[in-house]
Amino acid sequence: MPDAGMPVVGMVGAGQLARMTQQAAIGLGVDLRVLAGGTGESAARVISDVRVGDYRDLDDLRDFAKGCAVVTFDHEHVPTGHIAALAADGIAVRPGAEALVHAQDKAVMRERLTAVGAPCPPWRRVATEAEVREFGDEHGWPVVLKAIRGGYDGRGVWICDDPAEAAEVLGGGVALMAEAYVPFERELAVLVARSPHGQGVSYPVVETVQRDGICVEVLAPAPGLDPEHAAEAQRVGLKIANELGVTGLLAVEMFQTKTGMLVNELAMRPHNSGHWTIEGARTSQFEQHLRAVLDLPLGSPSMTAPVVVMANVLGGDDPDLFARYEHVMAHDPGVKVHFYGKEVRPGRKIGHVTALGDDLASVRERARHAAVYLSEGIYT
Amino acid sequence: MPDAGMPVVGMVGAGQLARMTQQAAIGLGVDLRVLAGGTGESAARVISDVRVGDYRDLDDLRDFAKGCAVVTFDHEHVPTGHIAALAADGIAVRPGAEALVHAQDKAVMRERLTAVGAPCPPWRRVATEAEVREFGDEHGWPVVLKAIRGGYDGRGVWICDDPAEAAEVLGGGVALMAEAYVPFERELAVLVARSPHGQGVSYPVVETVQRDGICVEVLAPAPGLDPEHAAEAQRVGLKIANELGVTGLLAVEMFQTKTGMLVNELAMRPHNSGHWTIEGARTSQFEQHLRAVLDLPLGSPSMTAPVVVMANVLGGDDPDLFARYEHVMAHDPGVKVHFYGKEVRPGRKIGHVTALGDDLASVRERARHAAVYLSEGIYT
């Protein structure tokens, strides 16, 4: 143990989520260690205690975990069995394998959510064209096919208009499930935290705006959301966290439809839909995750401004991002710029901006302007 | 240059100011390098690019500066001549030697402030008991003797009731100046930033509460300060920054007296009186310092809550600080805890807490309770 009794938190993965967790760890005085694929990764560039290894290798995970008070994750790709093996070694892994599997395996997630009464779209496991056809005939076309494991940011999701399209996806050889296509009005997300003690808190429900399966904008709180629906979404989030035994953060992505809300996806880590909390909430999601996995009392999720908008910055054609800081900062002294220290490639999430204020239209416009300019260098 | 055109900022010193600057650097995607005395220092524990060396050694400074877009400081102890030598090498050093000398040499500071019309207490350089006696006879006793160079946190300041006490201090062999003892009502501080372009911003004026020469509490904004006096203090801060050619932050510590405000001390770096800005202002002083030394447009200094109180956490007898987090966080989910990753020693500044809200008395009480509990483990 370092001085002052401060624990070492091990985070598997060294992407931007671990990088932003380091900002919170520095504040709390907690030592953050990451397991990186290489020293050039986003979080590895800003953390002293970087271990290079393979998260698919149990020996690497065991070496990494030595001396950590708790092990947690910046992604869901660690094999469930390895997580269970670490726990069997006596290591505190949060979330644990029994919870995390619901963020790794969409079919297990759907089974469990159905069992606990969380609202989901109709779904079934499918392996043949006949099964998809039968599902589509019952629930309508298009049918959404999803890879049961491994998808993210729109990858591993196919919207099939007819059995022929489904057959093509089935030919890809990955385990699939079918879901009814949900004609949603908009997408919402609720972020909750739960500690091993069982304490839970929920952030305000947000609206997420996706483009090509990638989150591009988050509006906090979700504009015009009926307070009863907001409270219901928070109850669903806290209930899922509790029923699944989540420790740490749980992000619940939802569809808002004419007839109510349906759970779309789960993530058990800091989440893109919660980046706004860095400036927009009294406790950022990154600090909250650390507090939860360390079983510390959770922090206040209350907002620091009436309206907060986060816009992702995607890489454009010109990699010289720093040259574009000048305009963005001069144009708006209140906008907050975040860059993840990643190589700039077209379409890649390389950062985000956050704007705060009283009026949704103007706050949203400020965030949009900054994000577009940082991406493209175009004044819009 | 790393990817995306991001510059390397070199900060000489690796204390808590550099440590908290790293949180801001991570956000901006700027690479922070520190010159540390050892790898166990506060900032060295949370930064990848740590160079170990001696800030009094010009060769070490030159090696350190290679590849940095700009060099700045977390303390004022680098010899002025070395800073000038780096600049002569073509290195951007901010603040430069001609500005920084005013934060290093109290006599030079007083001469210059007097010349530019900033309000100061009566003062003179003194070398003999006769000179101190003459000064005291003119301006009254007690007389404040100050080491012209090297003092901080109450060190290097002696309040002498009579010539005999002054004689004892004079015997210590350091260069001294005498100042009239100011019967102040309270202490204020104004923090401003200035960029090489000449852009300046000022944070709201705060009240600082000192105990034994160490800042223990900062109240933002200064309670009950007349708006005209607040504006005047901000004008004085911006004027000093401009007249002295400061680049980066300038903290101006002031005495509020019955007849007006007097400048006490200057610092040209992030400052204890500005720690409240991490959560309490739209742009933290650490981000502001980076923006200023990089000649980026400055960020908004506006407050995120009507009242913000910062209380320093001093080391107590029990080093196990982490064990005391649980009570503090459970007692108040909104209080923000900062620990500097330093060895806990009695009386040492090891961290701070910040509370935000609407009502001064309750916000101040929340910060006080948390700081006392973290220091002493006593519920008060």
Image (cartoon, coloured by chain):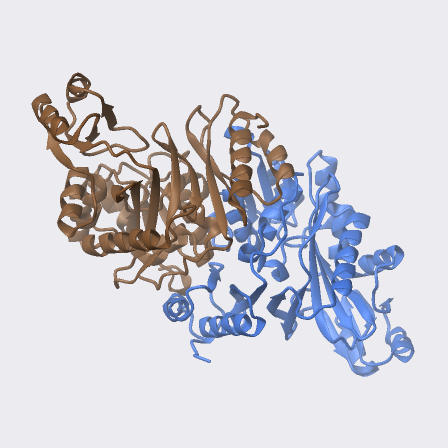
Chain colours: A blue, B brown
Where, quadrant-wise, is the N terminus of chain A in this rendering? top right
User: x and y percent of residue A245 in the render?
Assistant: 78, 46
Q: Is residue A9 above or below residue A327?
A: above
Q: Position of residue A309 (x, y in %)?
A: 57, 66
**Residue A173 visible to an observer of this rendering:** no
Residue at figure coordinates x 74%, y 48% from the top left: A246
Give percent across and percent down for residue B266.
26, 43
Count of numbered badges drawn on the protein: 0
Q: Is residue A128 in view from this perspective?
A: yes
Q: Residue at x 25, y 28 (%)?
A: B157
Quarter of the figure with residue B369? top right
Q: State the residue at coordinates (41%, 65%).
A: A333
Direction from residue A27 to residue A162 in the image, left or right: right
Spot occupied by residue A185 in the image (x, y as percentages of width and height): 74, 76
The correct choice, above or below, for B273 with respect to A206 in the image is above
Is residue A211 toward the left or the right of residue A2 in the image? right
Say whether residue B49 is left or right of residue B117: right
Q: Quarter-wise, where is residue A119 in the image?
A: bottom right
